[in-house]
């Protein structure tokens, strides 16, 4: 393995934190969805790195599934956002405050 | 490969296909749709019952069929049937979308059936996501409610973030441990907890499951989603999806072989925090669905007590409690759906005078709520007794003591509900609630099940015991 596993994990970790910050801090719903996507891809990178480390196929297969599910996630998420936009005319999180948490 | 082991899942998959085709078809006909789905759901319970004794593994040992998984599949099939039986007046959802609603309920049931049999990270992940995505779509289906759309979006964003966190945890575990089989991971893991990557991986992975079960501090989605979703959807989330979450958490904890001090500490903390916070916040709720949501958080804490005993009797009591919880919660939701027949949210104050509007509903509500509170002779009392004795036998005295205090706190708000139904007089006269003959019978059956299973738990307990032993492989 040319790149050590630790470096791959570091890259994945940085990407994951970036995605998490994006998902938590941004107020735009599309950007939040994007942040979640980045988190999923970070997990994918970590899986590929581990797969190469162990010379196994499981990790690679896992990534294929992650990509499929991420696509489903985007389609469901965007559909919901479009519906919400039609009802309220805004995709800013701050306008969604009907429910107490 | 033996496809016979896969029969319940294949059956529900076929039902999904049929419902998908029907939903593309001609004009909506709520009556016909309901009868069709009710028939399929009832047949599904029979199919799951028939396959209770199957055993074996599938898909390169990624999927394990044993008594434990089959018992939970019966519970899930029962959950679907009960939820569908609530849909005689599905006013909360647009008529044109009824079939989609049933379709998503069924896909969610299939996914949860896959989940309770999964013993490999990939199958767990795929099953968990399939069940969650069905729920993300079910929540905003509610008609004419801005709150439903909002709840759906928040549920989706928080849920996908939680599963991304869990997935990253899986990746860390795989990177350290070299396998995706859960049994292998939990066998090797205790020796590796010194490594930061392994510890971080485990904690992140557990987050996802705790989120599903709405354990503190991952419970904050529950009240909003419960309130925003249509009443029937809330009933489904509160019963079937909780049973599945208990099952998968139990499988993972059981595979760890138990006794690891670190894991016990984490479970004790979460259990205490969940039940205390759930019960205290439930006191000040005005909306019945929100109250039931916080009582779910509290009940997640009670179930964790059974898990942290790490003994066959502890697991058996947790399985028994899952059944008790399913029936009790469902009874409460049945009353809620009947009283709020127009599909609106029900405030506790609106229960006033229920004993005059419909004595049977008031009694069913009282029995269900007393069961949740753990008053004898209901099944809820027996379940709590079993959980606590199992924990005491393993020497967890302190947590049982805290749980007892919690039960007393919870009595207060459960009694408020009963008081509203029996003692408060309504401001205005509301019409009597008419129940059809099958519904009356159904309510009596539920009440009878709650009481008889509480007084004579032997048969159910034997089954739960056998399932727990299958889980541990002894």
Image (tube, coloured by chain):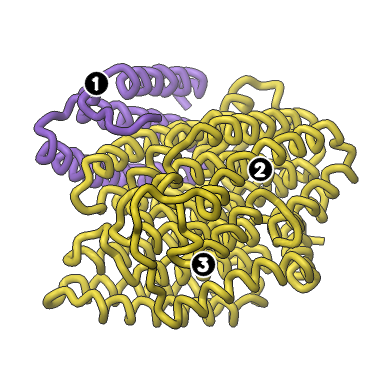
Chain colours: A purple, B yellow
Between B1 and B460, the residue placed more toward the observer is B460
| Residue B215 occupies quadrant | top right
Q: Is residue B211 visible?
A: yes
| Image point (57%, 64%), residue name | B363
The answer for how far apart the CA atoms under marks 2 and 3 are is: 22 Å
Q: Which residue is mark 3?
A: B359
| Image point (58%, 25%), residue name | B200
Which tag, 2 or 3, sits closer to the chain's start?
A: 3
Residue A27 image label: 1
Q: Which label lies toward us, 2 or 3?
A: 3
x and y, in percent, of residue B251 in the image: 65, 51
| Image point (31%, 76%), residue name | B34
| Residue B401 occupies quadrant | top right
Indicate the quadrant containing the N terminus of chain B: top left, top right, bottom left or bottom right. Answer: bottom right
> Considering the numbered disc 2 on the image, is that residue within a helix, a strand or a loop?
helix
Indicate the quadrant containing the C terminus of chain B: top left, top right, bottom left or bottom right. Answer: bottom right
Q: Locate residue A82 relative to residue B165 in the image: left or right.
A: left
Between B199 and B302, the residue placed more toward the observer is B302
Chain letter of disc 2 in the image: B
| Image point (73%, 32%), residue name | B268
Q: Which residue is mark 2?
A: B411
> Considering the numbered disc 3 on the image, is that residue within a helix, a strand or a loop?
helix
The answer to whether mark 3 and mark 1 are in CB contact below 8 A is no
Within-10-Å neighbours for mark 2: few <14, some 14–19, many 20+: some
> Considering the numbered disc 1 on the image, is that residue within a helix, a strand or a loop?
loop
Chain letter of disc 3 in the image: B
Q: Is residue B153 above or below residue B132?
A: above
């Amino acid at each position: 393995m040319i790149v050590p596993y630790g470096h791959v994990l570091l890259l994945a970790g940085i990407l994951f934190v970036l995605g998490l910050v994006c998902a938590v801090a941004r107020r735009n719903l599309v950007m939040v969805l994007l942040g979640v996507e980045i988190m999923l891809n970070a997990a994918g990178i970590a899986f590929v790195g581990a797969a190469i480390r162990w010379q196994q196929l499981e990790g690679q297969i896992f990534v294929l599934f992650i990509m499929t599910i991420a696509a489903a996630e985007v389609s469901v998420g965007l559909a919901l956002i479009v519906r919400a936009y039609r009802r309220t005319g805004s995709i800013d999180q701050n306008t969604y405050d009907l429910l107490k948490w | 490969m033996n496809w016979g082991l896969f029969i319940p899942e294949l059956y529900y998959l076929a039902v999904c296909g049929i419902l998908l085709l029907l939903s593309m078809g001609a004009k909506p006909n709520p009556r016909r749709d309901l009868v069709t789905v009710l028939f399929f759901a009832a047949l599904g319970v029979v199919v799951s019952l028939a396959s209770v004794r199957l055993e074996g593994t599938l898909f390169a040992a990624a999927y394990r069929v044993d008594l434990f998984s089959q018992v939970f599949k019966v519970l899930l099939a029962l959950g679907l049937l009960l939820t569908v039986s609530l849909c005689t007046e599905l006013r909360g959802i647009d008529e044109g979308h009824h079939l989609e609603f049933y379709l998503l309920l069924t896909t969610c049931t299939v996914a949860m059936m896959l989940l309770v049999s999964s013993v490999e990270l990939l199958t767990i992940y795929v099953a968990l996501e399939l069940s969650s995505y069905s729920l993300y779509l079910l929540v905003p289906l509610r008609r004419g409610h801005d709150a439903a759309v909002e709840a759906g979006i928040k549920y989706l964003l928080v849920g996908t973030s939680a599963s991304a966190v869990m997935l990253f945890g899986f990746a860390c575990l795989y990177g350290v441990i070299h396998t995706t089989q859960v049994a292998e991971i939990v066998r090797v893991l205790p020796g590796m907890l010194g490594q930061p990557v392994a510890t971080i991986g485990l904690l992140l992975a557990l987050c996802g499951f705790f989120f599903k079960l709405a354990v503190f501090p991952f419970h904050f989605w529950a009240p909003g989603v419960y309130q925003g979703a249509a009443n029937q959807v809330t009933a489904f989330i509160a019963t079937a999806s909780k049973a599945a979450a208990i099952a998968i958490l139990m499988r993972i904890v059981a595979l760890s072989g138990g006794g690891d001090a670190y894991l016990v500490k984490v479970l004790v903390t979460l259990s205490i925090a969940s039940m205390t916070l759930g019960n205290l916040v439930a006191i000040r709720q005005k909306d019945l669905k929100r109250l039931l949501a916080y009582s779910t958080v509290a009940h997640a804490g009670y179930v964790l007590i059974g898990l942290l005993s790490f003994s066959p009797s502890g697991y058996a009591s947790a399985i028994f409690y899952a059944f008790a919880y399913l029936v009790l919660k469902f009874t409460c939701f049945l009353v809620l759906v009947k009283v709020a027949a127009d599909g609106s949210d029900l405030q506790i104050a609106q229960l006033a005078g229920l004993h005059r509007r419909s004595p049977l509903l008031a009694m069913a509500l009282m029995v269900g709520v007393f069961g949740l509170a753990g008053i004898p002779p209901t099944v809820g009392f027996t379940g709590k007794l079993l959980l606590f004795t199992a924990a005491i036998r393993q020497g967890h005295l302190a947590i049982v003591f805290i749980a007892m205090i919690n039960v007393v706190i919870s009595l207060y708000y459960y009694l408020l509900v009963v008081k509203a139904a029996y003692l408060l007089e309504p401001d205005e006269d509301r019409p009597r609630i008419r129940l059809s003959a099958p519904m009356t019978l159904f309510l009596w059956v539920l009440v009878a099940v709650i009481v008889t299973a509480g007084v004579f738990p032997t048969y159910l307990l034997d089954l739960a015991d056998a399932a727990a032993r299958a889980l541990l492989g002894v």
